[in-house]
Every structure is written in C-alpha cells, then in structure tokens.
Image: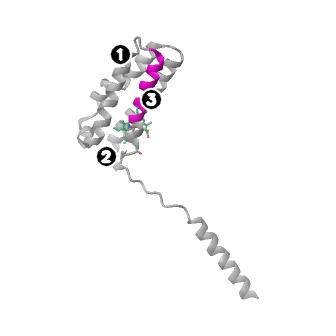
C-alpha cells in the first residue's frame, strides 16, 4: 500500500512537472542589427520619439490642431534621419534602409500636407506610416 501511494505521488509529480514545462518553444526569427549597448540606447530613443510623434499627430487630427500635427511630424522627419549616428547607419542592411528612409520622408510629407489637406487624408497617411513601423518591426531586432 505504502509503495502504491508513493508511486501515485511520483506519477502525479511527474505529470504536473511536465505540464509546467509544456510551454511552447518561442523562437525569435527577426534579423539582428547587432547594435552595441550604447547604439541601442540611441536607436530605441529615436523609436520612442517616433511613437510620441504618432501620438501628437493623432491628437492634432482629432482636435483639428494643424500646428500640433506639423510639430509632431517634424521630430521624426529628416531631422531624425540626419541625427542617426553613422555607426548605426553602417550596420543596417538595405532592407532596413528601404523601410527606414521612406518612413522619415513620409513624416516630412505629412508636415507639408498638414497645412491644408483634409484631416481624413492625413489620417490615411498616418496609417501608411504605421504600416512601415509594423513591416520593419516584424523583420528586425536591435540585438
Ligand atoms: C526600418 C525599421 C523600423 C521602422 C521603420 C520603425 N522601427 Fe521601431 N523599432 C525597430 C527595431 C529594430 C526595434 C527594436 C526591436 C527589438 O529589438 O525588439 C524598434 C523598436 C521600437 C520601439 C520600442 C522602443 C523601446 O524603448 O524598446 C518603439 C516604441 C518603436 N520601435 C516605434 C516605432 C514607430 C512608432 C515607428 C513608425 C513611425 C517605427 N518604430 C518604425 C525598427 C523600426
């Protein structure tokens, strides 16, 4: 009897242990940019700034505040493209550049079009910009 109980307990432990280790293996298939620690800090700071820009643009569209749209978009346009350190630019493959460069240019386009285009078309352009964010994030990681 004692033997049976300990067998039951060991079986239970075995089953519950395997249940816990049953997490699906998650594999990250994104391409690594292989940035150094400090390049990554700068790079991710730019990224968060782009998110701030998107937030300001949407608020500007919602409140019909064109000055806010323009100011928000300017932060992530050419100014940001120029400020990216050379060492980071050198590490990024052409597929990355083909998404990154045009994204900054689309912010510049928004700056110009925000002067008098209707707000719906500005919303659509913002959505086009976001498609680039999504496309790049699905392919690349910083380290
Ligand atoms: C050309 C490629 C590319 C484009 C375009 C791009 N990103 Fe990123 N972004 C990245 C990579 C790579 C990372 C790092 C992801 C990782 O390592 O997991 C990242 C990370 C981020 C992060 C996380 C920052 C942090 O502190 O961890 C935010 C927020 C972000 N991006 C916002 C945006 C927004 C908003 C846009 C579009 C307006 C955008 N990104 C466009 C490549 C891109």
9 inside magenta stretch:
no
> Residue 81's quadrant in the figure?
top left
Reading the image, the residue beneath label 2 is 33
Residue on which the image places disc 1: 112
Label 3 SS: helix
Residue drawn at the location 28% of the way across and 37% of the way down: 97
Q: Is the C-beta separation of discs 3 and 1 under 8 Å?
A: no
Sequence-earlier tag: 2 or 1? 2
Mark 2, other Cα within 10 Å: few <14 / some 14–19 / many ≥20: some
- In x, y percent, where is residue 20? 59, 65
Residue 57's spot in the image, x, y percent?
46, 22
Tell me if 26 is positioned left or right of 105 in this view: right
Kindly tell me whether mark 2's CB lies below 8 Å from ligand 1: yes
Identify the residue shown where x is 42% and y is 14%.
117
Q: Name the residue under label 3.
A: 127
**What secondary structure is found at the residue carrying circle 1?**
helix
* Residue extent of the magenta highlight: 118-132
- Find residue 101 and report its horizontal and vertical position in percent: 29, 32
- Mark 3 or 1, closer to the camera: 3
Taking the image as shown, residue 10 lies to the left or right of residue 51, namely right
Q: Is residue 105 visible?
A: yes
């Amino acid at each position: 009897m004692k033997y049976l109980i300990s067998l039951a307990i060991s079986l239970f432990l075995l089953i519950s242990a395997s249940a816990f280790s049953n997490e699906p293996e998650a594999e990250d298939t994104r391409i690594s940019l292989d940035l150094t620690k400090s390049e990554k800090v700068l790079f991710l700071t730019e990224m968060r700034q782009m998110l701030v820009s998107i937030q300001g643009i949407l608020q500007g569209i919602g409140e019909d505040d064109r000055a806010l749209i323009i100011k928000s978009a300017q932060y992530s346009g050419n100014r940001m493209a120029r400020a990216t350190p050379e060492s980071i630019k050198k590490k990024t493959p052409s597929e990355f550049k083909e998404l990154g460069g045009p994204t900054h240019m689309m912010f510049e386009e928004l700056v110009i079009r925000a002067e008098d285009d209707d707000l719906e078309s500005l919303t659509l352009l913002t959505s086009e910009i976001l498609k680039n964010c999504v496309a790049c994030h699905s392919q690349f990681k910083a380290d």
